[in-house]
C-alpha cells in the first residue's frame, strides 16, 4: 500500500482543506496516511524544508504537493508504479 505523509500546522486552514481532499481520495483509492505537525514531532530537516510551504504532501517519501491537494493528480500518482 502506498504511504502518504502530510506535514501540517495547527490552525492552518489550507491544511484542513488538504486533509479533507486526501480523505475524499482515500475513500476510493486507499493509501496509508500519516499527518505530522511541523511544530511537534517533525524532524528539524522537515521543519527547515517545509516551514513556509504547509501543507506539504509526500508520497512514499517524495514531495508531490504543497499548499493545496490536486485530487486528480493524486489519483494519477497513486495509480503509477512505485
Image (spheres, rainbow, N blue to C red):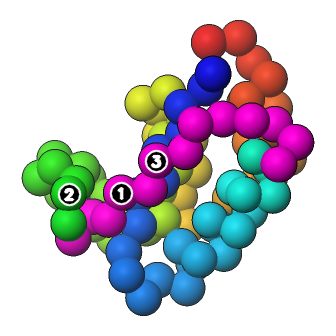
Examine the rendered structure and indicate whether residue 20 appears above or below residue 34. below
Q: CA distance from mark 3 to mark 2?
A: 12 Å
Check disc 1: other Cα within 10 Å, few if <14, some if 14-19, many if 20+.
Answer: some
Q: CA distance from mark 1 to mark 2?
A: 7 Å
Q: Which residue shows up at 37% across the image and 81% down it? A: 10
Quadrant of the snapshot with the C terminus: top right
Q: Which mark is residue 41?
A: 2
Residue 47 locus on image (x, y percent): 21, 58
Question: Can residue 68 be seen at all in this image of the molecule?
Answer: no
The answer to whether residue 72 is left or right of residue 80 is right
Instruction: Report crowding for label 3: few under 14, some 14 to 19, many 20 or more residues within 10 A (C-alpha).
Output: few
Query: Would you say the residues marked 1 and 2 are in contact, meaning their CB atoms lie under 8 Å apart?
Result: yes
Taking the spot 52% from the left edge, 50% from the top edge, the residue there is 57
Look at the image and give the residue range highlighted in magenta: 27-39
Return the residue nearer the eye: 11 or 55: 11
User: Where is mark 1, residue-wise?
Assistant: 36
Amino acid at each position: 500500500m502506498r504511504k502518504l505523509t502530510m506535514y501540517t500546522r495547527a490552525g492552518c486552514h489550507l491544511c484542513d482543506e488538504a486533509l479533507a481532499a486526501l480523505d475524499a481520495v482515500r475513500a476510493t483509492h486507499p493509501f496509508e496516511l500519516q499527518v505530522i505537525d511541523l511544530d511537534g514531532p517533525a524532524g528539524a530537516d522537515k521543519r527547515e524544508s517545509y516551514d513556509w510551504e504547509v501543507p506539504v504532501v509526500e508520497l512514499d517519501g517524495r514531495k508531490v504537493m504543497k499548499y493545496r491537494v490536486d485530487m486528480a493528480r493524486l489519483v494519477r500518482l497513486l495509480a503509477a508504479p512505485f
